[in-house]
Amino acid sequence: MALAVGIRVSSRALPRPWALLQGATIRRTEPAAGGGDSARRFGTQRVLVEPDAAAGVAVMKFKNPPVNSLSLELLTEFIISLEKLENDKTFRGIILTSDCPRVFSAGLDLTEMCGKNPAHYAEYWKAVQELWLRLYLSNLVLIAAINGACPAGGCLISLTCDYRILADNPKYLMGLNETLLGIVAPFWFKDTFVNTIGHRASEQALQLGLLFRPAEALQVGLVDQVVPEDQVLSTALSVMARWMAIPDHARQLTKNMMRKTTVDRLVKQRDTDIQNFVSFISRDSIQKSLQMYLEKLKQKKG
């Protein structure tokens, strides 16, 4: 979003996203399938974690019904849970998936970007940045077990992972479709896309806001495997074993070498990126476009 900056909000003046949940508790729930302390679940209101300490793997599930929209609260709780796992040396890999039927994540929460003040837009965008930065260079093996529709921000999250597995259901579309809403994907969305499927395919897909069916997503390289819907998680666990067979230090250094240039570009321009987002999203024309789209969604639900 190469737009003139009209509203100044420093990212350093914003609270770190998890500061919003001071006093929030990580809740422990019932043991996961397989039982035992090593499989005891924990989580927050919108994120469920099913750890298997013996295997060194945790399954993180989005559970923000109905469509796992990436609200500020979900982003914050996700970062808290991710940080907890990264600080526990027991875990070497995470599988990201959904606890909501038929949707991985519908992407950014449009209500966070409509009808609010500039300070809120800046706070929200910094949380989106923070999640991407933490995922894209995570030392853990990240595998996306995509068990539902995966547009926009949901697609971005999956693209941060080291490996992507998509359920073979023609209704489960995947891609960055921001232009269809009159929104421009920021440069680091674009960079992640280009790193995954190449420049020409990204140029066409981003301009047209293309959403790919599973077979198309596999063909273009958005995902690494398409499997029957009931085999997504089991396949992710099998793939995880192959990735974890590689010595961590060698894999981590290689990942850093491949991705650091992309990350550094955002880190150097983080404040400017926030300013551009706030300026863009605050435009009357964009606000009207978002309001119209949200009204259409309400009518469909009605």
Image (spheres, grey):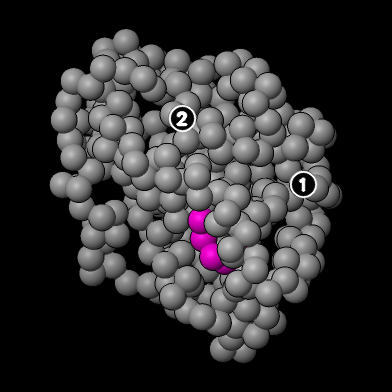
Residue at mark 2: 187
**Mark 1: amino acid:** Asp
**Which label is found at residue 54?**
none
Camera-side residue of 286 and 259: 259
Q: Is residue 77 above or below residue 128?
A: below
Instruction: Report whether 209 appears left or right of 264.
Output: right
* Residue in the picture at 68% in, 31% down: 198
Q: Is residue 166 above or below residue 244?
A: above
Q: Is residue 216 above or below residue 286?
A: below
Q: Can residue 125 be seen here?
A: no
* Residue in the picture at 81% in, 45% down: 226
Camera-side residue of 248 and 164: 248
Q: What is the quadrant of the N terminus in the image?
A: top left
Task: Where is residue 140? Give x, y as percent.
Answer: 57, 66
- Secondary structure beneath dot 2 equals helix
Residue at mark 1: 224
Span highlighted in magenta in the image: 137-141
Q: Earlier in the sequence, mark 1 or mark 2?
A: 2
Query: Among all residues in the image, which is located at the extreme top?
Result: 285
Task: Where is residue 184? Give x, y as percent.
Answer: 45, 21
* Residue in the picture at 47% in, 26% down: 185
Label 1 and label 2: CA atoms lie apart by 24 Å
Query: Among all residues in the image, which is located at the extreme bottom?
Result: 36
Instruction: Report whether 37 appears left or right of 302.
Output: right
* Residue in the picture at 34% in, 51% down: 73
Instruction: Report whether 94 appears left or right of 184.
Output: right
Report the predominant secondary structure element of the magenta stretch: loop
**Mark 2: amino acid:** Phe
Q: Residues within 10 Å of mark 1 (few under 14, many from 20)?
A: some
How many numbered badges does the structure rendering display? 2
Task: Where is residue 83? Give x, y as percent.
Answer: 42, 67
